[in-house]
Image (tube, rainbow, N blue to C red):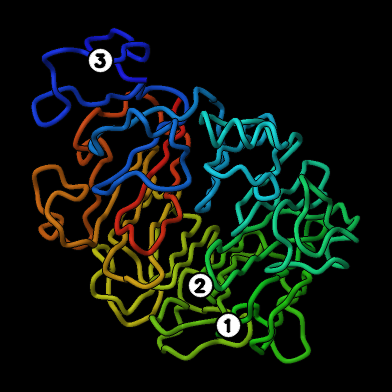
């Protein structure tokens, strides 16, 4: 809702003598200290928000509250839908599209969300939830895997466990296994997903989706529509227990329980860390120091890995990245900081120059911007003036309305190619 000097104006149809242009009334956020708050950066409001949610969003410099839900541990999105998982296992979904097949919502809730905005409970007992191009994957606390949305890009009827070959009206369990551990999805074309499955100490890496540039780690470019073990060589499954796995446009990265780092797939921009730009058909170990990795991230233009000492490493050949230590395509340490906790990377498939990297360090979130337009996430300072290796505190780059709550989670929205800067969603408490 909009407020003027603290007065709720949602029921006021018109105010005589005041304008909405420069110097007039601009929309302000309901709060910046709690719930789920969205901030658009240098771009008009776009999907996946409903028209009702954007009705009062008159100035892209301002943030506004999407929901008063708290206790968020993760968020996810695609062009038509966004979701938030609470610590109690409740998974909430918002959307701008009434097609319930895509959201795991009832028809009534999907229509309500698309028309009036807000988030609705989609599934309970969830430990992991991630959006795909037309719906969601979710792992429940009992280790079962669930799916909603369009099947065609990901699974066949048999792989789904006998569900529809076109779409699922709500949620359906994938098979009957109860040992699914984690899942990550690249939501855009070419659709790719990785998952970790198995008992502790024997959690192996699986994949499904398109095999462009060996993205499925099978040694070929064949499309998979069933979960299949990633291979380390022809005919040999990767025999390492995996703790973390991520994927991007035709590429994958994973960390084993023992701290080894593996990459595979497209490598045109040297993001896989082996010093060359040849695509990798199979998951192979990156032997760079320190070999005590515990987290990893991948995009089409860069790869990152964090070690147990809290140091962050990056591999790329893109000189446009503001935080790159070199462009040689090897995992090389970024600066001297030892307090890295998390990354959230915004990227565009076709525009490597337009990116943002958000890093959580020492309990606070920072951003590094590689764009060249003045004012983008730099306040009054041109983004091009930001030095390599620089991290800027979130509240130092927001142009309006500093965040006063604790940022429990930060999520960069998937965006259409026409949107060069991200919508960023903060879960605050």
Which of the numbered marks, if any, corresponds to residue 14?
3
Can you say which quadrant of the picture contains the N terminus? top left
Q: Position of residue 404 (x, y in %)?
A: 32, 24
The image quarter containing residue 263 is bottom right
Which of the numbered marks, if any, corresponds to residue 158?
none
Element marked by disc 1: helix
Q: Name the residue rendered at 17%, 47% in the picture.
A: 378
Nearer the N terminus, badge 2 or badge 3?
Answer: 3
Q: Nearer the viewer, residue 335 or 187?
A: 187
Q: Position of residue 398 (x, y in %)?
A: 23, 38
* Residue 325 against residue 145 in the figure, above or below: below
Q: Is residue 226 left or right of residue 244?
A: right
Element marked by disc 3: loop
Q: Residues within 10 Å of mark 2 (few under 14, many from 20)?
A: many
C-alpha gap between disc 3 and disc 1: 54 Å
Asked if marks 1 and 2 touch (Cβ < 8 Å), the reply is yes
Q: Name the residue rendered at 66%, 65% in the picture.
A: 194
Task: Name the residue tied to disc 1.
Answer: 212
The image quarter containing residue 284 is bottom right
Nearer the N terminus, badge 3 or badge 1?
Answer: 3
Q: Position of residue 136 (x, y in %)?
A: 66, 51
* Residue 381 against residue 193 in the figure, above or below: above
Q: Nearer the viewer, residue 309 or 93?
A: 93
Task: Name the residue tied to disc 2.
Answer: 249
**Image depth: mark 3 or mark 1 in front:** 3
C-alpha gap between disc 1 and disc 2: 8 Å
């Amino acid at each position: 809702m909009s407020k003027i000097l603290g007065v709720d104006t949602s029921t006021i149809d018109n105010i005589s003598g005041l304008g909405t242009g420069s110097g007039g009334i601009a929309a302000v956020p309901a709060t910046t200290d709690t719930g789920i708050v969205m901030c658009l950066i240098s771009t008009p409001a776009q999907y996946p928000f409903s028209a009702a949610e954007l009705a009062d969003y008159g100035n892209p410099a301002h943030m506004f509250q999407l929901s008063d839900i708290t206790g968020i541990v993760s968020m996810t999105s695609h062009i038509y839908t966004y979701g938030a998982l609470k610590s109690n296992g409740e998974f909430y979904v918002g959307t701008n599209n009434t097609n319930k097949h895509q959201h795991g919502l009832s028809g009534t809730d999907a229509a309500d969300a698309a028309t009036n905005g807000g988030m609705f409970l989609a599934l309970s007992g969830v430990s992991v939830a991630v959006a795909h191009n037309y719906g969601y994957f979710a792992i429940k606390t009992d280790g079962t895997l669930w799916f909603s949305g369009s099947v065609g890009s990901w699974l066949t009827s048999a792989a789904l466990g006998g569900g529809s070959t076109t779409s699922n009206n709500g949620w359906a369990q994938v098979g009957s296994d109860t040992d699914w551990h984690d899942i990550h999805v690249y939501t855009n074309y070419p659709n790719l997903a990785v998952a970790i499955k198995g008992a502790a100490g024997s959690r192996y890496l699986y994949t499904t989706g398109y095999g462009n540039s060996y993205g499925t780690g099978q040694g070929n470019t064949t499309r998979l529509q069933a979960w299949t073990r990633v291979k380390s060589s022809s005919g040999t499954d990767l025999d390492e227990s995996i703790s973390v796995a991520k994927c991007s446009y035709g590429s994958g990265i994973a960390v084993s329980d023992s701290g080894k780092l593996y990459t595979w797939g497209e490598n045109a921009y040297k993001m896989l860390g082996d010093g060359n730009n040849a695509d990798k058909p199979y998951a192979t170990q990156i032997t760079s120091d320190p070999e005590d990795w515990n987290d990893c991230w991948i995009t089409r233009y860069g790869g990152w890995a964090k070690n147990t000492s809290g140091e962050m490493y990056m591999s790329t050949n893109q000189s446009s990245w503001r935080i790159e230590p070199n462009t040689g395509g090897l995992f090389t340490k970024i600066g001297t900081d030892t307090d890295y906790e998390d990354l959230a990377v915004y990227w565009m498939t076709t525009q490597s120059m337009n990116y943002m990297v958000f890093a959580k360090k020492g309990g606070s979130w920072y951003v590094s911007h590689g764009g060249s337009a003045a004012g983008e996430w730099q306040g009054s300072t041109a983004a091009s003036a930001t030095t390599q290796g620089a991290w800027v505190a979130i509240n130092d780059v927001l142009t309006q309305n500093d965040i006063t709550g604790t940022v429990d989670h930060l999520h960069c929205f998937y965006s259409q190619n026409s949107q060069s800067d991200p919508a960023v969603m903060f879960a605050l408490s």
